[in-house]
Each structure stands twice: as C-alpha cells, then as structure tokens.
C-alpha cells in the first residue's frame, strides 16, 4: 500500500466491488465523470493480460466548483481518482489522498477542501 492513497481490501468479487464503490461514492456526493477499464485497454492496445483494474474519475461538483474559484488550475488535479483492482485473488479499493495531491499548492483554503474531500472519500471506501 502507498502513502499517497487510502486503500481497503474488500470481500467482494471485482464486479460487485466496483458497483458498491460507485454507489458509496454517490452517497458522498460524487459522480463518476470517467471510467477506464485498464485491463481491457491494455489487452486491446498491447495484447497484454493483466488482472481486473478500473479507474473511476470521481467528482463532487460543489467542492470542485469552489476549488476552481480559488485555484483555476486545480483542474490539473481533477477528478479524484478511485481505483478498484484485483491482486492475487484479492480485491482492493483505493483513492488518491487529496491532502497529498494538493499539498504543494500552499493555499490554506485548498487545504480545507482537500481535508473535507479526503474524509468523504475515506467514508465511501470504508463503506464498500
């Protein structure tokens, strides 16, 4: 596990874990803007077989709008990436910690938003 992500091992199959992750993110006010099926993409582009892996681009619109008002280039760090993946028959859900991703901005208002969003992401992941 990394120090830049918040990760939880879950007791679901990959498909169920992905669906529950979407559901719990929704309960915390996140919509899914993008979804990348890494397994399918690597197979198609490189003919490489990898384990199940999906990247969900999650966005909480009120906080994104507020953040963009404060820091217009915040879009470089959006949306929040949440991953669901299989590793050696175990399924994990993980999110990039906004407090780490935004730490170099040096703006106290952004730090407050990052703390709030990180709490919401952790809550969603904990409920998966």
Image (spheres, rainbow, N blue to C red):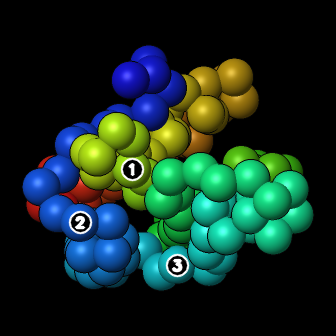
Discs 2, 3 touching: Cβ within 8 Å = no
Q: Residue at x 48, y 59 (%)?
A: 52
Q: Position of residue 91 (x, y in %)?
A: 29, 50
Q: Nearer the viewer, mark 2 or mark 3?
A: 2
Q: Position of residue 14 (x, y in %)?
A: 32, 66
* Residue 67 as seen in the image, left or right of residue 69: left
**SS of the residue at dot 3?**
strand
Depth check, front residue: 122 or 119: 122
Disc 1: which residue: 86
What residue lies at 28% left-to-right and 46% top-to-bottom?
A: 89
The correct choice, above or below, for 40 with respect to 108 in the image is: below
**Residue annotated with mark 3:** 32
x then y, percent, for residue 115 = 39, 40
Is 46 above or below relative to 114?
A: below
Q: Which residue is mark 2?
A: 13
Helix or strand or loop: what does disc 1 sit on? strand
Horizontal and vertical percent for residue 36?
Answer: 65, 69
Indicate whether 69 appears above or below 18: above
Tag 3 or tag 1, which sits nearer the N-term?
3
Residue 72 can be seen, yes or no? no
- Of callouts 1 and 2, which one flags the residue occurring earlier in the amino acid sequence? 2
Alpha carbon separation for disc pair 1 and 3? 20 Å
Q: What residue is at 39 percent from the left and 50 percent from the top?
A: 86
Tell me which numbered mark, 2 or 3, is placed earlier along the sequence: 2
Image side of residue 123 versus residue 11, left or right: right
Residue 55, image quadrant:
bottom right
Label 1: few (<14), some (14–19) or many (≥20) C-alpha neighbours in 10 Å: some
The CA distance from mark 2 to mark 3 is 20 Å
**At numbered mark 2, what does the secondary structure look like: helix, strand or loop?**
loop
Q: Quadrant of residue 43?
A: bottom right
């Amino acid at each position: 596990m990394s120090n830049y992500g918040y990760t939880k091992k879950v007791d679901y199959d990959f498909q169920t874990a992905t669906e529950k992750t979407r559901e719990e993110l929704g309960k915390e006010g996140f919509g899914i803007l993008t979804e990348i099926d890494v397994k399918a993409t690597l197979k198609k582009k490189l003919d490489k077989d990898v384990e199940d892996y999906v990247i969900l681009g999650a966005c909480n619109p009120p906080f994104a709008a507020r953040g963009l008002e404060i820091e217009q280039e915040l879009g470089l760090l959006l949306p929040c990436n949440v991953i669901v993946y299989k590793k050696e028959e175990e399924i994990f859900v993980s999110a990039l910690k906004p407090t780490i991703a935004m730490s170099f901005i040096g703006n106290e208002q952004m730090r407050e938003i990052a703390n709030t969003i990180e709490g919401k992401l952790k809550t969603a992941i904990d409920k998966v």
